[in-house]
Image (tube, helix red, strand yellow):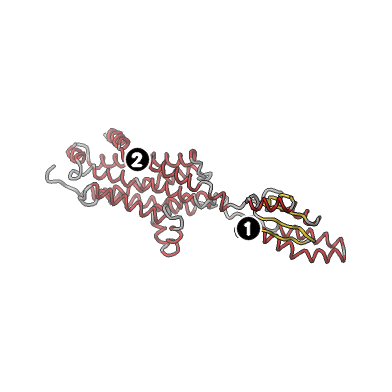
Amino acid sequence: MFFHNLINEVKINIRAKELLIWLMLFPIALGTFFKIAFGSIYEGDIVFSKVKTAIVEEEKSDTFHSIIKEVSNGDDPLLDVTWTDKDKAMKLLEDGEVEGIIFVDDAKLKLSITGKGSEQSVLKSFCDQYNSQAGIIKEAYDENPIKMLMIADDLKKEINSVETIPLTEGDTDVYLQYFYNLIAMVALFGTVTGLHVSINNQANLSKLGARKNCSPTPKIISTIAALLASYMVQSLCVIVTITFSKFVLKVDLGDKLPLVYLAGIIGGIMGTSAGFFVGSIGSFSENLKVGICTSVTMILCFLSGLMAGDMKGTIETYAPIMNKLNPAALISDSFYALNLDSDYSRFIYCIVVLCIMSVIFVALGLICTRRKKYASI
């Protein structure tokens, strides 16, 4: 009896048009738009790349050649150098093919730039540092050429002394949060599927509910079967969204993909449980309850950063408790924890809180549903 009800409930959920639109097609379309909008911004504007630089050598300097060789080679070079004359260098600068021109004259560097971006700041810092040491090198050469070579070696080490030490092994692309919150939105849209479980078991809200209340099947069995079917279908929708993001859109979800699926599924279960509880409250119309669930879901996703990337940070500053209780924030935080954290403490916290919420919502929903009696159907 239970499995018969379970199979029928799965079929009912799969055939629902709103399920196909809002839990599959809409996330796929929105994720595609996110990829188009944010796909190359991080690499182009945030991740540092070597600075394209033209060098005009008005006077040859072996020391400068040695230093340029050090900063333009290796796994993480600072400069991408083009040696040329003044006229060609100016043309390259005007065409935007280089960020600046370094003129080498009498062991000193002169810089010509047209913008004020981070690349120009790097070039200015490099030239200032070199020039600040040029006098010391020249003075050392006059006194002792061997000492000059030692100072030149120290200068090269100083210029290359900045070492990139990442705080995490994960992907720090700030635009990943939009994809994390997209998955969280799909999970919380489970409120609509959970809502229909309650409505379809209430005789005063749906015809299907009236038939179920007249059937010999115990109400608790049909309710649990419907709830479990909703969990299964909601989990499928979350899996589809994660799979599409990972393998079609090529979103970096880290190297712990099974746990990403687990977090998304648990988030979907929590959303379905919350919808089940909302649907069991009162005798309001189905449309009103759907509107409430959808509105609350979108508000929670907004506070988590789906529409405004810095919203979660603002909430953390002024009302951090909201991020600790917001299901959308907990789901996206679980993805962040898997990608960025070296341990699982934050991930476990998020999963435990989502599970506790699920249990509470299901318990309250069952209590409210079982209390309902009908004088006539």
Rendered view: 213 above or below 60: above
Is 30 on the left-hand or right-hand side of 172?
A: left
Query: Would you name the residue on which mark 2 appears?
Result: 21
Q: Amino acid at mark 1?
A: Thr
Residue at position x 24%, y 44% in the image: 199
Residue 299 image label? none
Three-letter amino acid code of the residue under disc 2:
Ile
- Label 2 packing within 10 angstroms: few (<14), some (14-19), many (20+): few
Residue corresponding to mark 1? 114
SS type, badge 1 = loop
Position of residue 231 measured from the top left corner of the image (x, y, whole percent): 35, 42
State the CA–CA distance, disc 2 to disc 1: 50 Å
Crowding at dot 1, Cα within 10 Å, few <14 / some 14-19 / many 20+, comes out as few
Q: Position of residue 335 (x, y in %)?
A: 47, 49
Residue shown at 83% from the left, 66% from the top = 139
Q: Is residue 283 visible?
A: yes
- Which mark is nearer the camera, 2 or 1? 1
x and y percentages locating residue 200 in the rendered image = 24, 42
**Mark 2 vs mark 1: which is more N-terminal?**
2
Quadrant for the C terminus in the image: top left
Question: Residue at (35%, 51%) from the top-left corner?
Answer: 297
Can you see residue 51? Answer: no
**Quarter of the image that includes the N terminus:** top left
Quarter of the figure with residue 56: bottom right
Q: Residue 52: x and y, percent?
A: 66, 51
231 vs 34, nearest the viewer: 34
- Element at label 2: helix
| Total numbered circles | 2
Q: Nearer the viewer, residue 41 or 280?
A: 41
